[in-house]
Image (cartoon, grey):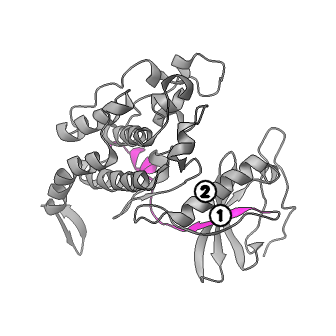
């Protein structure tokens, strides 16, 4: 095991404070670091070994400069409660949380596979892969709706692609009631519906907001480009039309190579008015026949899957 530096060490000036946990170091008793996976504004993520389950897990830690923040701890607790309550084949599973002490964290399922974002880097995702993924994702959103929960950050980075795709990261998820009273923008700019960009003027945020996020995700995957790209992501003083172009205009038409039925469904999800969007259940029902048709055309052999 390499010598371990101070666990509360911060980076250079201007950088976010980060844990410097080394391989083999315990995050909590019986839970030891394998390697660092990455991090965001509020969290760092580690691959870890869990002695109790004799298995690899993912640990999502509050950054050291966030551990004293009551708001950050409440957000972590909210995510822990949701993970404990929700159970769906397409949703990431949680295996407990440590909400007190010097290293508040969540213990999450370790999943292998590429993100949808990584596939898009190579160009548009094939219809044969995208249609079943879309139906699974719509099914997961329908389940969240039935549980009174909105995800609020559905995007290609938060979808792992496999035989059954998986939705990850419930950091922003909250109850429908909590979402409806949200007063400030929340989410990832290119995948936020108008009401998430401007809750005060276009709100309230609700389950239809996740349908828009799914539509933006599918648009990006089907075409290889985002439906909306903010001109300036950093300048909080920039006009709303610059920061959130979806407030002022419609997305460009999808390329002609996107099948009409899929393209129409995607564009319906991106309706500016939440009441004009399909529900997640309606979307799944609408796309399922085309997805089933694709499945019947795929044969699996010793050399992998191929179209008949």
**Residue wearing tag 1:** 106
Residue 92 left/right relative to 27: left
Residue 295 left/right relative to 22: left
Neighbourhood count class around disc 1 (C-alpha, 10 Å): few under 14, some 14–19, many 20 upward = many
Q: Which residues are magenta?
A: 103-124
Residue at the spot 42% in from the left edge and 40% down from the top edge:
213
The quarter of the picture where residue 264 lies is: top left
User: Gap in Å between the C-alphas at discs 2 and 1?
Assistant: 9 Å
Q: Earlier in the sequence, mark 2 or mark 1?
A: 2
- Whether residue 152 appears in magenta in the rendering, the answer is no
Residue 76 location (% of width, % of height)? 67, 55
Residue 89 location (% of width, % of height)? 40, 66
Residue 56 left/right relative to 210: right
Residue 74 location (% of width, % of height)? 70, 52
Count the labels in the image.
2
Looking at the image, the residue that sits furthest to the left is 308
Looking at the image, the residue that sits furthest to the front is 177
Image quadrant containing the N terminus? bottom right
In terms of secondary structure, where does tag 2 sit? helix
Residue 205 location (% of width, % of height)? 49, 36
Q: Is 265 above or below relative to 272? A: below
Residue at the spot 46% in from the left edge and 66% down from the top edge:
87
The mark found on residue 114 in the picture is: none
CB under 8 Å between discs 2 and 1? yes
Residue at the spot 49% in from the left edge and 48% down from the top edge:
151
- Whether residue 120 appears in magenta in the rendering, the answer is yes
Of 131 and 34, the residue lying toward us:
131
Image quadrant containing the C terminus? bottom left
**Residue wearing tag 2:** 79
């Amino acid at each position: 095991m390499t010598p371990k530096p101070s666990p509360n060490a911060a980076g250079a000036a201007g950088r976010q404070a980060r844990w410097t946990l080394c391989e083999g170091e315990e995050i909590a008793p019986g839970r030891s670091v394998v390697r660092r996976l990455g991090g965001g504004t509020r969290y760092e993520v580690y691959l870890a070994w869990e002695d109790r389950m004799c298995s690899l897990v993912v640990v999502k830690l509050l950054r050291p400069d966030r551990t004293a923040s009551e708001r950050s701890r409440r957000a972590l607790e909210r995510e822990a409660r949701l993970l404990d309550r929700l159970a769906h084949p397409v949703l990431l599973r949680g295996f407990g949380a440590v909400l007190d002490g010097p290293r508040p964290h969540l213990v999450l399922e370790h999943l292998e596979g590429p993100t949808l974002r990584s596939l898009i880097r190579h160009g548009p995702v094939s219809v044969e892969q995208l249609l079943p993924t879309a139906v699974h994702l719509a099914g997961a959103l329908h389940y969240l709706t039935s549980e009174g929960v909105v995800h609020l950050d559905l995007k290609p980075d938060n979808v792992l692609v496999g035989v059954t795709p998986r939705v990850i990261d419930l950091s922003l998820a909250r109850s429908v009631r909590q979402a409806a009273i949200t007063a400030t923008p929340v989410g990832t700019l290119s995948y936020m519906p108008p009401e998430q960009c401007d809750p005060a003027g276009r709100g309230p945020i609700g389950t239809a907001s996740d349908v828009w996020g799914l539509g933006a995700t599918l648009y990006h995957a089907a075409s290889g480009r985002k439906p909306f790209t903010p001109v300036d992501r950093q300048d909080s003083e920039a006009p709303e039309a610059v920061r959130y172009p979806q407030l002022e205009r419609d997305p460009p038409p999808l390329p002609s190579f996107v099948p009409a039925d899929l393209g129409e469904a995607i564009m319906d999800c991106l309706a500016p008015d939440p009441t004009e969007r399909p529900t997640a259940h309606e979307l799944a029902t609408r796309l399922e026949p085309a997805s089933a048709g694709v499945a019947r055309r795929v044969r699996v052999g010793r050399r992998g899957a191929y179209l008949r």
